[in-house]
Image: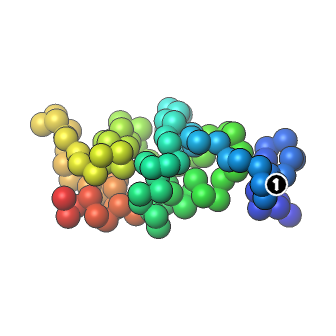
Amino acid sequence: AVEQGARAGGEVLGEGEPRADTVKFNVGGRIFEVLREPTLSLHPGTLLSTLAEEHSGDDPIFVEANPELFPYILQYLRSRSIHIPITVSKGAVLAEAARLGLTSIADG
């Protein structure tokens, strides 16, 4: 059994031990580093926020998503707005956002 808060090296994150300010996501082999506060904390209940909350290690969290579209998702998380170039499918970005629990992206 794995203890909640266990690190990759078997070390357990203590109650008072600070967590890293950033979290890394591995999306299709590409690593994206994101601030926990405020970027992810502004979107509680999303898959990325939940994964980050449950993760205490330094290793990247694997996310099944399109690495070409993921930067647009991060842009939305950071600024609550998104600018999609004409060469990128808006529908594909919205579908990717929905898979990651960002249903509010379609409202903006």
- The quarter in which the C terminus is drawn is bottom left
Can the viewer see residue 32 in this picture?
yes
Q: In the image, residue 67 lies at what x, y percent?
A: 41, 38
Q: In the image, residue 6 lies at what x, y percent?
A: 80, 53
- The answer to which image quadrant residue 9 occupies is top right
Can the viewer see residue 92 in this picture?
no
Answer with left or right where residue 51 lies relative to residue 106: right
Residue farthest front in this picture: 16
**Residue at (50% x, 42% y) in the render:** 35
Closer-to-camera residue (91/50): 50
Closer-to-camera residue (89/6): 6
- The quarter in which the N terminus is drawn is bottom right
**Residue at (41% x, 60% y) in the render:** 43
- The answer to which image quadrant residue 24 occupies is top right
Q: In the image, residue 13 lies at what x, y percent?
A: 79, 51
Q: Name the residue carrying label 1.
A: 14
- Quick check: 35 above or below 1? above
Closer-to-camera residue (56/103): 56
Residue farthest left in this picture: 86
Q: Secondary structure at mark 1?
A: loop
The total of numbered circles placed on residues is: 1
Q: In the image, residue 77 lies at what x, y percent?
A: 36, 49
Q: Residues within 10 Å of mark 1 (few under 14, many from 20)?
A: few
- Quick check: 22 above or below 6? above
Answer with left or right where residue 46 lies relative to residue 20: left
Tell me which colouring the rendered structure shows. Answer: rainbow
**Residue at (57% x, 41% y) in the render:** 22
Answer with left or right where residue 73 lies relative to residue 90: right
What amino acid type is highlighted by mark number 1?
Gly
